[in-house]
Each structure stands twice: as C-alpha cells, then as structure tokens.
Amino acid sequence: MDDIFSFLTELASAPFRRLFTARGIAIILAAALSFAVYQIIVSSSFGEELNLRDLFPLGNPKKVTFYSGSRNGDYYTIVQDLKSVIEKNENFEIDNDPFRAAGFQNSINVWQNKNSFGFIQGQGLEKDDYILDNIDLIAPVYTEHLHIIVNKELVKNKIKKELFGNIEIGNNEDSELLRALLEAGRINIGYYGTGAMWIGSKIIDEWLKQIQRTDSKMVNYSTTTFPLTDAIDSLRNEKLGMVMFMMAPGLEGYDTVVSDTSLAIVNLSPEFVIKLRDESKLQIRPTTFDYFECKDTNSVKIKTIKSLGTFTYLGTGKKTDIRLVNKIIEGFVEVRREKKASYFAEIDYDKPICSQLKEGARNEKDVDFYFQLFFGKDSINFEDIFDDRMEEYRNKILKIISLFILSMLLSIIPLYIAMIWLFSGANYWKYL
C-alpha cells in the first residue's frame, strides 16, 4: 500500500517517465478496469448505462433544440416564453424548431437528436414501444384537449334539420346524426404524426361501430391531414366538413373559431370518452373547458366544451445530461411563476376569472390561454412534480458519485496487484 502511494508521488514529479514502467502501466490498467467495475455496478443498480458526463460536468451546449411544431400552435407559444427565460438566465440558447410535425414525431426527434427536447402527448406512445424505451418523459406539463368543429350548414344539409348550439355525442347516438357528421365533407384528423390524428382515427372507428348497429349501409367518408390553419379556412369555405385538433384552450385566434356561428362544436360525453379509452387503450380522460373574454371584471364565456384530454409531457433522449434537463425544468417553473405574477392577483376557482386579473392584464392576448394552461381546473401543478423530479436527479447524482468512489477504492488495489502479478509472474512481490 505504501509503495502505491510512493509511486503516485513519484508519478506526480515525473509523470511521463514513470507511466512507462511496469508499475505505471499496471496502475493505468487497474484504474481502467476499476472504472469498468463501476459501470457494471451502476448498470445493475440503475438498469441503464451511465456516462462520464454524469460524473464530470462538461458544461452546457451552446444551443438546445426544442421541437414544437407549428408556429400557430400552443407548443410553439409556450417554448417562445421558455426561450426568453432561458436565454436571460443561462449561457445557452433555445432553437425553437417549428418545421416538424408535433405529437409522436417529437418523440422520434428527441430520441435521434442530441441535446433536444419536445412536447410529447402521452397517448402517442404504447407500452413496450421501442421509442418509449429510449426517451425520458420527464413530467406532464399540462392537459391538451381535443376540439371537434364541424361546418354547421354542411351537417344540416345531410341531416335535413336545423342545428342549435353544440352537438353532443354519447355511447348510443342516433346513427343518422353520426352519418351526417361523417358524410358532410372531408374530415381533417390533424397533421400527420400528431396526437389528433391518432385519437381522431379511433373516434371515427367508434362512430362507425355505433352506426353499424342499426344501419348496415356503407358510410361514405374520407379523411385528410391539412395543417391546422389551412384546415380551419377550408372548414369555413365548406371544403371540409369537420376538423379535429388538439390544443390547450384559449390560444389566441382559436376563440374566434369556437365563437363562429357558421361552425358547431361536437361535444363528447364522459361516458363516450371512458368507453373509447377502455376499448382503444388510449391515455385519455373526460375534460371540460371554457373559452371566455374579459371585457370587464366578469368573465364572458364564449363556449363551454366537453371533450377529452391527454397529458402533454416534456420529453428528451435518455442520454441527455441530467444538469441540462434541470435547467429546462427550472425554465418552465420560472415561466409559470412569471405568468402568475404578471396576470393574477389571486387564483380562486369560485370567482370570475376576469375579476382576479391585475390591472392592465385583461387586454393581454394570451391571458385566457395561460390561465387554463397553468392554473385552470384541469391544469397540473407541475412545479411540485418538477421539484420531486429534480430531487430525484440530485439523489441519482449522489448515488453515482458514491458508487464511483466506492467501486474505485475497493477494486483498484487488488486489480493493481493482479496486473503486477501478470507482468512479473511468481516474482511479482519485488514490484511492490
């Protein structure tokens, strides 16, 4: 033991010359093998391979890519606020990538691209999915809701009667109404790779089953996958009969869609959503949400919508640096705190939303969006979730460091002696 420490002292004074002796090569090989022992221990303990960057901070990358989908969507809006917070407080920038399809495509993006993040809808990944096994769903950030909007005139022409207000679909719906909804015009089920496309296809399948119980005549319908803004324009111009999209309610511009008298909202009853969830194995649940305007201290509701919702997760690749993940988490928590401090004097669900706004906040274009996103009845208190997750990361790093020190201390000395024995045979003691 004393000889090892004396050798290390000599090595410090003449590093290159001493490294090329038998003892130098032995200590290098022993250290390398000790690290291998550490990797085996950690791998069996955590069920995954851990990298040097988990032990030794290598600094943040200069740029982090965040896959957010369309510039008109809620993902892009939220990430723009995150970008502002991160670039103000950290030494790296956020590249908000709008040129990819959102939803399931984002899970592929973060898996394949280093130092990247994205929003991923929970229902887009199934158990034992290969992609799911290679990404980290860090935590749910908010509930995303399904909107189903139809052209009222086209449906009315099919059903041959006037439509008043919203349309509600249950488990035992009139086949005539369902047929009218499906045959009124082409159905936009969301851009390719999005959660709306995934869920919309399952909803259509369920409607077809209901129709076939009482009506054996073939249903003539077709689907398409326009980007959302193009789809809404086509719906108003009667080029589409129905549009399905998933979004956090209140995003600027879409309040005009749900308040348009030429369009009708299709509500889904809680019973229908539960049956759809159970039969299709989707990660969805019944939700209700409101669109409102704040013209004074009282909330002026535009529409109340009954639909389904799914959690939207913050996702990244399995090998993303723990410390970088924490920086992104802290950024989201700061966005929520800033919105609460800027807009709301208090949060009380028994009072009108607009009466709780600070002076001047009533005219902010995204106040409805952020209220329902972060503070509404269906919102997630993700600050607590993220706090727990950050504590989990800190504990993980502590375990990694402890295991590293322990495995190195317990293995390097016997491995050093073993290397010397291999080099010298029966006379190895003369090297110690």
Image (cartoon, rainbow, N blue to C red):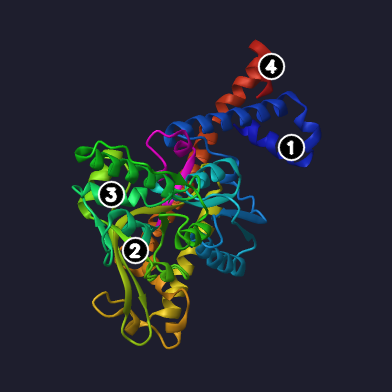
| Camera-side residue of 176 and 425 | 176
**Residue carrying label 4:** 423
Is residue 178 rendered to the left or right of residue 98? left
> Where's the N terminus, which quadrant?
top right
Residue located 56% across and 48% down the image: 321
Indicate the amino acid at tag 3: Leu
| Camera-side residue of 57 and 293 | 293
| Earlier-in-chain disc, 3 versus 1 | 1
Image coordinates for residue 340, horizontal then vertical, percent = 41, 75
| Earlier-in-chain disc, 2 versus 1 | 1
Asked which secondary structure carries label 2, the reply is: strand
| Earlier-in-chain disc, 2 versus 3 | 3
Indicate the amino acid at tag 4: Phe
Image coordinates for residue 31, horizontal then vertical, percent = 62, 31
Disc 4 to disc 2: CB gap under 8 Å: no
Asked if residue 226 lies in the magenta stretch, the reply is no
Disc 3 to disc 1: CB gap under 8 Å: no
Q: Label 4 to label 2, Cα distance in Å? A: 83 Å
